[in-house]
Amino acid sequence: MGAREDILGNIRRSLGVRGDERTRRSVVQERLARAPKGLIPQRGQVSGEARIALFKEQAESVQASVARVSDRAQVPEAIATYLRDHNLPAELRMGSDPRLTGMPWGETSLSLRHGVSDGSDTNAVSHAYGGVAETGTLVMVSGADNPSTLNLLPDNHIVVVDAAEIEGDYETMWERLRATYGKGVMPRTVNYITGPSRSGDIEQTLLLGAHGPRRVHIIVVGDPGSA
Amino acid sequence: MSVHSTSPQFKANAGHALADAQLQRAMGNVKKGFIDKRRAAADRLPEFEEMRDSARDIKDHTLAHLDLYLERYEEKVTEAGGHVHYARDADEARRLILDICKAQGAKTVTKGKSMISEEIGINAYLEAAGMEPVETDLGEYIIQLRNEMPSHIIAPAVHLNASQVESDFRRVHKHLDKDRDLSQPVQLLTEARAVLRERFLAADVGITGANFLVAETGSSIIVTNEGNGDLTQTLPKTHIVLASIEKIIPTLDDVAQLLRVLARSATGQDLSVYTTFSTGPRRAGDLDGPENYHVVILDNGRSSMLGTSFEEMLRCIRCGACMNHCPVYHAVGGHAYGWVYPGPMGAVLTPSLIGVDKGGHLPNASTFCGRCESVCPVRIPLPKLMRHWREREFERHLSPATVRAGLSFWGYFAKRPALYRFTTRLAMGTLGWLGRIKGERKGRFSRLPFAGGWTQFRDFPAPQGATFQQRWRQEQRAKKQARDGREAA
Ligand code: SF4
């Protein structure tokens, strides 16, 4: 017998089941189909500006910084200011997300690079799929629009997120993902990012900037009511 | 059996650990850091206790239907273009991984933190085949340089001090300036980041563990703070996930419940920095991500734990809270446990995986104070399970002769209540008297016959001079008198 059959057989023997019992199968199918939500904390159950405020508070509590602009056209200037304020070079890498490439970059003196990083970029910008207010978490999906390596390799990661795409809890984010990609289907990579990279491995001291970005700067765009 | 175990020598290991000043200083960091942070994180979430119930129930439900969820998980991985392989034991898992690496002509293999990879001892195996495995989690990297095992399941180098790390870096990073300043932990981190960045970019295969495998979508999930796991699974051409059967979780919503208790219990964060869901290889049009995605699912004795009293141990989500709160772990550190998994969870899991004959000492490394169970996010009754092992060890006559003799001696008296009362009264009276006149510090013994294992490392408090039964009777009498007094008034 192969390892697969052996292991499944041993699981069934230990559980005292055959594997073809109709009730067990339907219990499993039902759970997969319905994906019951479980217990959702009250914390994220706020809407409108209160939700944006919670997102900001939570993100800042994990050492991310958060700025707010009223529309997309203001993002390039906000990024240029951020880089200047932190004495960072005026260069920026991004993927091919039209929400990013369509911004008025000509109004700044930033030098842009496109595509994946070779590990030597100082700054990159990505557009988030959304945010989760409960923990100040950014939700990133992979693809040419926003390559996953941009979330990890640059020293400073700037993330644009639409205020209207910040949800209260993870469960609502799953609903949206299922609506976008189809039930049971996921993009290659979904990154939940909560603050900049860190390590506590040396004497349990918290140090920022382990292997991922040392800084995460979030720019929230627009109103929570309108996308 | 996989990596070499020194669990049978637990007592000797513990003795060395207690005498190791360096280790004792480092272990102080565990007590300081983890406990307060977990408490604060739990207090920030009013639903935390209910969330633990929810996490336990999800795990119980999954284990009861594990065969079916596994089948579904495999189906979804295959649909997404990935490959699922099954390994009955460590050897089978090692061979599967080596074959995948060989097929890729791999030279450098980067690794995210994975306890299962420690369990199967993959590094030595790959090295023997001429490949170079590189641990990328900072703690794992440090212990790899030292040729040690992790001493904690989420903080592998917690037994070390910064000065030890500095001398290891100076010894190994020979190409760097001899006079560089490494006196601050942040300088050590920066150096490791730079050295490992090159390794990430050069790697042919990346191996990660998985915190969860999702049946609904066929996704593997890793939870990290450093970002090393993400670089490990995104940059190389091939990503291998190594996970054991009990990592399966039904749906994304179920995962959300478990995530809410995992980081809070582990590091006291509301959520770890990176929670990454990987599903199959890179898609058409993707500019990054691995071209090949393999999952090796390991049993290694776990399927036989189902349906026994040890099934509950398979709920474990490897948060480390039980060891962070364990007075025995604080005292001896992780290496004394002699195999991959230390602390209370190791004391229960190790005998299951490598046999009670080898791991049977570990369940004795407990004071039964119950703190582990009180913090375990999936409510595993660790003290009860340790007791089960002790019973089995005793039944199988694996306890050392002195323990058996002691217990049968006690049994003889316990069956004869009058004699028991008389003897214990006599003994307690004597000890109490000795304690009063002879105890070197008042009321304590620093040496006692037959109890060297105890008094070598701590004093034994001298009894008050009365047995429990005597004091119980006295108190009952006092209470009755008080009651009678009240009633009479
Ligand atoms: S036994 Fe419980 S507390 Fe210990 S590591 Fe596992 S889940 Fe965490």
Image (cartoon, grey):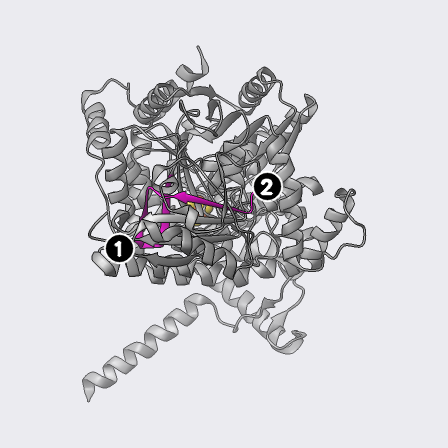
Q: Secondary structure at mark 1?
A: helix
Residue A52 pos. (x, y %): 28, 57
Residue type for callout 1: Gly
Residue type for callout 2: Ser
Residue B201 pos. (x, y %): 60, 33
Q: Quadrant of the N terminus of chain B?
A: top right
Check residue B197 for magenta coloring: no
Residue displayed at 58% across by 21% down: B101
Q: Which of the 4 quarters of the picture holds residue B80?
A: top left
Residue displayed at 63% across by 40% down: B196
Q: Is residue B343 visible?
A: yes
Nearer to the camera, B259 or B327: B259
Residue A27 pos. (x, y %): 20, 29
First to last magenta residue range: A121-140
First along the sequence among labels 1 and 2:
1
Q: Is residue B150 visible?
A: no
Nearer to the camera, B2 or B485: B2
User: Which disc number belongs to residue A44?
Assistant: 1
Nearer to the camera, B268 or A44: A44
Q: CA distance from mark 1 to mark 2?
A: 37 Å
Magenta region, mostly helix, strand or loop?
A: strand
User: Which disc number belongs to residue A120?
Assistant: 2
Foreground: disc 1 or disc 2: 2
Q: Which of the 4 quarters of the picture holds residue A18?
A: top left
Check residue A128 for magenta coloring: yes
Tag 1 and tag 2 share a subunit: yes
Residue displayed at 43% across by 47% down: A106
Residue furthest bottom in the image:
B489
